[in-house]
Amino acid sequence: MAETTHTEFSPNTAPEGEVTDLGDLDEKARLGAPSGAAASASIDGFTEEGERLSAQNTGSEQFGLKKHSHGNATVIPEASRGERRRSFDLADYPTLTGLEEDWRFTPLKRLRGLHTDALTGASPAVAVTGAGKVTVETVGRDDARLGTAATPEDRVSAAAWNAFTEATVITIPKETAADGEVMVSVTGSAMEAAAQQILINAEAFSKAVVVLDHSGSATLAQNVEIIVGDGAELTVVSVQEWNDDAVHVSSQQAKVGRDARYKHVVVSLGGDLVRLTPSSIFTATGAEVEMYGLYFADAGQHLEQRLLVDHAVPNCKSRVTYKGALQGQDAHTVWVGDVLIRKAAEGTDTYETNRNLILTDGARSDSVPNLEIETGLIEGAGHASATGRFDDEHLFYLMARGIPEKAARRLVVRGFLNEVIQQIKVPALEERLSESVERELAAGNL
């Protein structure tokens, strides 16, 4: 695949021609908008089907409205990712129109009312197994622990917060290592729009792997709160292997304590529309975060992931690696990676990368890495994005050694995605997901 974006910043070195003074960058660049010739072209037209490229100008500027960086919107986006609205009150979020930066790629009509209707449907069933030394509770919405780790930052998340009646709370006690993996099965069986709340609390110096395994049919707005206590080691794996008719919008926010180690892995394979917004917010120094993602979209499927790494304190480290594959007409994936290094976050070390492999004609992949730096006193920061087809040299190498083209193509895809699967460190789940990828390849006749 050809590299489409690669940027790296450090206090001492920079690539030739690189702009290291972020004060020289215009607002469009910091928001991930096109630059140069691409920026000079008008990109207008947003509908409930998602972003639509058009040469038409709706003329909002004639009314004195500031032009949105991705079209003629009647709103002015926040200049910084840190300025994003956060509120538990649904009234603080206007009705979505498709003009919003956060929703410009999402086909709103396919949300089945998660952004407009009351979420009164039955929430998917939650069953927890393998929870040795771990406390599992079902609590009411008045439990004081809820809402302490995450505040909604979009309309669907706020709607979910206001609609849920019961929540699942999983606690790994202080200085305790869980016996094996904690498997949280989330199984949907109804299509009415529903809300769900889950809290995972890894107390100080605890250690655990928690797997959120989503399956069945559902129309679900979900909030997952994650607390990683001081010195704790927590891995959260979120698997979306829904039936083909499912719609799932999930906010998965983590607060990471002093010297903690947090790994978040997303695997999205099933569902009609799946949109995840994972975030990691550093609250004390010395912590490390790894965020991995794997997604495989088939014809007509929309898989979207928008993540945030918020370096709010000094001397923390983060690494982000997301990989996706697409096949079939109108298969669509979206990856937006926001890394925010605040003014106080001196000594930050961060890098994010996204790779997308397009297997057939008719598929579309959008990849937008965003890096916002408010201090120059960092260890290093960078991002990279690439989208393309098979590497002909790889295929030639395999075929020259007697491997048929079809088998060679599968080997390339398996190797491409296996980097993420191996990060799960749960052998049974890794094997299952590898088999799921094989089924995806077979369905696409690759």
Image: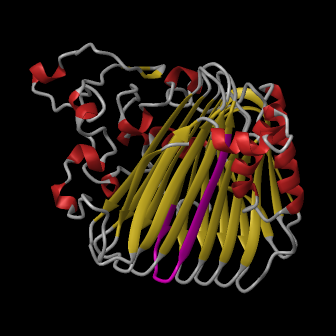
Is residue 277 in view?
Answer: no
Residue at figure coordinates x 84%, y 39% from the top left: 438
Q: Position of residue 298 (x, y in %)?
A: 70, 28
Q: Position of residue 372 (x, y in %)?
A: 32, 59
| 94 left or right of 327 in image | left
Q: Is residue 166 magenta?
A: no
Height in image: 31 above or below 364?
Answer: below
Height in image: 89 above or below 51?
Answer: below
Residue placed most toward the observer, 412 or 188: 412
Residue at figure coordinates x 42%, y 46% from the top left: 89
Q: Main secondary structure of the magenta part?
A: strand
Q: Position of residue 288 (x, y in %)?
A: 55, 75
Residue placed most toward the observer, 223 or 246: 246
**Position of the C terminus by quadrant:** top right
| 46 left or right of 256 in image | left
Is residue 14 in view?
Answer: yes
Residue range highlighted in magenta? 280-295
Residue placed most toward the observer, 279 or 94: 279
Q: Position of residue 7 (x, y in %)?
A: 38, 57
Residue placed most toward the observer, 159 or 372: 372
**Position of the N terminus by quadrant:** top right
Height in image: 49 above or below 406?
Answer: above
| 415 left or right of 253 in image | right
State the scheme by which the image is colored: secondary structure
Height in image: 105 above or below 400?
Answer: above
Total label count? 0
The part of the image, by quadrant, that contains residue 8 is: bottom left
Residue at figure coordinates x 37%, y 20% from the top left: 53
Residue at figure coordinates x 40%, y 26% from the top left: 98
